[in-house]
Image (tube, rainbow, N blue to C red):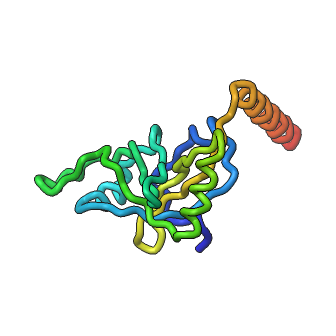
Protein backbone atom coordinates (compact mmCIF):
# COMPACT_ATOMS: atom_id res chain seq x y z
CA UNK A 1 0.00 0.00 0.00
CA UNK A 2 1.49 3.43 -0.95
CA UNK A 3 2.22 6.00 1.74
CA UNK A 4 -0.73 8.13 2.74
CA UNK A 5 -3.24 5.36 2.09
CA UNK A 6 -5.20 3.45 4.69
CA UNK A 7 -8.29 4.10 6.79
CA UNK A 8 -8.25 7.88 7.22
CA UNK A 9 -8.79 8.95 10.85
CA UNK A 10 -7.93 12.67 10.86
CA UNK A 11 -6.73 15.21 8.33
CA UNK A 12 -5.10 18.62 8.76
CA UNK A 13 -6.89 20.65 6.08
CA UNK A 14 -5.36 23.91 7.25
CA UNK A 15 -1.84 22.62 6.48
CA UNK A 16 -2.29 22.89 2.70
CA UNK A 17 -3.77 26.35 3.19
CA UNK A 18 -0.89 27.65 5.32
CA UNK A 19 2.11 25.82 3.79
CA UNK A 20 3.62 24.77 0.47
CA UNK A 21 4.14 21.04 1.11
CA UNK A 22 7.36 20.00 -0.64
CA UNK A 23 7.94 16.45 0.59
CA UNK A 24 6.02 13.91 2.68
CA UNK A 25 7.15 11.11 4.98
CA UNK A 26 5.18 8.27 6.56
CA UNK A 27 5.94 7.87 10.26
CA UNK A 28 4.76 5.46 12.92
CA UNK A 29 3.64 6.70 16.34
CA UNK A 30 4.73 5.56 19.80
CA UNK A 31 1.45 5.34 21.72
CA UNK A 32 0.50 4.48 25.29
CA UNK A 33 -2.28 2.26 26.60
CA UNK A 34 -5.70 3.34 25.37
CA UNK A 35 -4.51 5.89 22.81
CA UNK A 36 -4.93 3.50 19.87
CA UNK A 37 -8.53 2.81 20.93
CA UNK A 38 -9.29 6.54 20.89
CA UNK A 39 -7.58 6.88 17.49
CA UNK A 40 -9.63 4.03 16.04
CA UNK A 41 -12.75 5.76 17.39
CA UNK A 42 -11.69 8.90 15.50
CA UNK A 43 -11.20 11.12 18.56
CA UNK A 44 -8.11 12.91 17.24
CA UNK A 45 -7.37 16.53 16.37
CA UNK A 46 -4.32 17.55 14.30
CA UNK A 47 -5.23 21.23 14.06
CA UNK A 48 -2.42 22.97 16.00
CA UNK A 49 0.07 20.11 16.01
CA UNK A 50 3.64 20.27 14.74
CA UNK A 51 6.76 18.12 14.75
CA UNK A 52 10.28 18.91 15.95
CA UNK A 53 13.61 17.14 15.66
CA UNK A 54 15.19 16.91 19.13
CA UNK A 55 18.47 15.05 19.83
CA UNK A 56 18.24 13.02 16.62
CA UNK A 57 14.62 11.96 17.20
CA UNK A 58 11.37 13.39 15.83
CA UNK A 59 8.61 14.32 18.27
CA UNK A 60 5.00 15.38 17.62
CA UNK A 61 3.65 18.19 19.80
CA UNK A 62 0.06 19.35 20.47
CA UNK A 63 -1.77 16.47 18.78
CA UNK A 64 -4.94 16.01 20.82
CA UNK A 65 -6.09 12.41 21.38
CA UNK A 66 -9.18 12.38 23.61
CA UNK A 67 -9.15 10.02 26.60
CA UNK A 68 -10.85 6.68 25.99
CA UNK A 69 -14.26 6.46 27.72
CA UNK A 70 -13.71 3.00 29.23
CA UNK A 71 -10.05 3.72 30.03
CA UNK A 72 -10.51 4.79 33.70
CA UNK A 73 -7.13 5.22 35.42
CA UNK A 74 -5.17 3.88 32.43
CA UNK A 75 -5.99 6.96 30.34
CA UNK A 76 -3.31 9.29 29.07
CA UNK A 77 -2.63 13.01 28.88
CA UNK A 78 -4.47 14.19 25.71
CA UNK A 79 -1.77 16.67 24.59
CA UNK A 80 1.38 14.76 25.52
CA UNK A 81 4.43 14.79 23.25
CA UNK A 82 4.62 11.65 21.10
CA UNK A 83 7.68 10.14 19.44
CA UNK A 84 7.56 9.50 15.69
CA UNK A 85 9.22 6.42 14.21
CA UNK A 86 11.29 7.12 11.10
CA UNK A 87 14.39 5.64 9.46
CA UNK A 88 17.71 7.30 10.33
CA UNK A 89 18.26 8.61 6.77
CA UNK A 90 14.77 10.18 6.79
CA UNK A 91 15.51 11.88 10.12
CA UNK A 92 18.81 13.20 8.71
CA UNK A 93 16.93 14.66 5.72
CA UNK A 94 14.42 16.28 8.07
CA UNK A 95 17.25 17.78 10.14
CA UNK A 96 18.64 19.31 6.95
CA UNK A 97 15.24 20.74 5.98
CA UNK A 98 14.51 22.22 9.39
CA UNK A 99 17.92 23.93 9.53
CA UNK A 100 16.93 25.87 6.39
CA UNK A 101 15.07 29.12 6.93
CA UNK A 102 11.27 28.90 6.74
CA UNK A 103 10.80 25.12 6.69
CA UNK A 104 8.69 23.32 9.27
CA UNK A 105 7.35 19.80 9.87
CA UNK A 106 3.56 19.64 9.59
CA UNK A 107 1.36 16.58 10.22
CA UNK A 108 -1.02 16.14 7.27
CA UNK A 109 -2.98 12.93 7.89
CA UNK A 110 -3.43 10.29 10.55
CA UNK A 111 -4.55 6.88 9.31
CA UNK A 112 -4.58 3.19 10.15
CA UNK A 113 -2.44 1.06 7.82
CA UNK A 114 -2.16 -2.70 8.35
CA UNK A 115 -3.39 -2.28 11.95
CA UNK A 116 -0.84 0.40 12.87
CA UNK A 117 -1.44 4.13 13.33
CA UNK A 118 0.60 6.10 10.79
CA UNK A 119 1.14 9.83 10.39
CA UNK A 120 1.82 11.52 7.06
CA UNK A 121 4.37 14.21 7.88
CA UNK A 122 4.95 17.03 5.41
CA UNK A 123 7.91 19.36 5.04
CA UNK A 124 6.28 22.74 4.50
CA UNK A 125 7.38 26.26 3.73
CA UNK A 126 5.05 28.93 5.09
CA UNK A 127 2.80 30.77 2.65
CA UNK A 128 2.50 34.53 2.60
CA UNK A 129 -0.90 36.19 2.66
CA UNK A 130 -0.83 36.96 -1.07
CA UNK A 131 -0.05 33.30 -1.85
CA UNK A 132 -3.14 32.23 0.11
CA UNK A 133 -5.29 34.74 -1.79
CA UNK A 134 -3.88 33.49 -5.10
CA UNK A 135 -4.74 29.89 -4.21
CA UNK A 136 -8.27 30.89 -3.23
CA UNK A 137 -8.72 32.67 -6.59
CA UNK A 138 -7.51 29.58 -8.48
CA UNK A 139 -9.91 27.32 -6.56
CA UNK A 140 -12.82 29.70 -7.17
CA UNK A 141 -12.02 29.86 -10.91
CA UNK A 142 -11.87 26.04 -11.05
CA UNK A 143 -15.29 25.81 -9.34
CA UNK A 144 -16.75 28.27 -11.87
CA UNK A 145 -15.42 26.21 -14.77
CA UNK A 146 -16.84 22.99 -13.31
CA UNK A 147 -20.19 24.67 -12.62
CA UNK A 148 -20.42 25.99 -16.19
CA UNK A 149 -19.46 22.57 -17.56
CA UNK A 150 -22.19 20.85 -15.51
CA UNK A 151 -24.82 23.36 -16.62
CA UNK A 152 -23.79 22.91 -20.24
CA UNK A 153 -24.23 19.13 -20.01
CA UNK A 154 -27.86 19.36 -18.77
The relative height of residue 94 versus residue 135 in the rendered view (above or below) is below
Which residue lies at the image location 39% right of the left edge and 58% below the top edge? 83
Is residue 106 in view from this perspective? Answer: yes
Which residue lies at the image location 20% right of the left edge and 51% below the top edge? 69
The relative height of residue 143 versus residue 86 in the rendered view (above or below) is above
Classify residue 133 as left or right of residue 64.
right
Which residue lies at the image location 54% right of the left edge and 57% below the top edge? 120
Classify residue 28 as left or right of residue 16.
left
Taking the view exactly as shown, the residue that stands out farthest to the left is 73
The relative height of residue 108 versus residue 1 in the rendered view (above or below) is above
Classify residue 62 as left or right of residue 95.
left
Name the spot of residue 16 as percent of width and height, x first.
Answer: 63, 42
Name the spot of residue 86 as percent of width and height, x first.
Answer: 50, 66
Taking the view exactly as shown, the residue that stands out farthest to the right is 152
**Res. 126 image quadrant:** top right
Which residue lies at the image location 69% right of the left edge and 29% below the top edge? 128
Name the spot of residue 94 as percent of width and height, x first.
Answer: 58, 57
Is residue 4 in view from this perspective? Answer: no
The image shows a total of numbered marks equal to: 0
Q: Quadrant of the N terminus?
A: bottom right
Work out whether residue 86 or residue 111 is closer to the camera in this orientation and state it: 86
Name the spot of residue 150 as percent of width and height, x first.
Answer: 81, 41
Work out whether residue 46 or residue 101 is closer to the camera in this orientation and state it: 101
Q: Quadrant of the C terminus?
A: top right
Amino acid sequence: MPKGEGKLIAQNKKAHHDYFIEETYEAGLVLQGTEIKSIRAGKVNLKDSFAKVEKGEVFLHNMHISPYEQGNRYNHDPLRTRKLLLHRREINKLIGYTKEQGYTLVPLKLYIKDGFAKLLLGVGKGKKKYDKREDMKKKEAQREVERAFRERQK
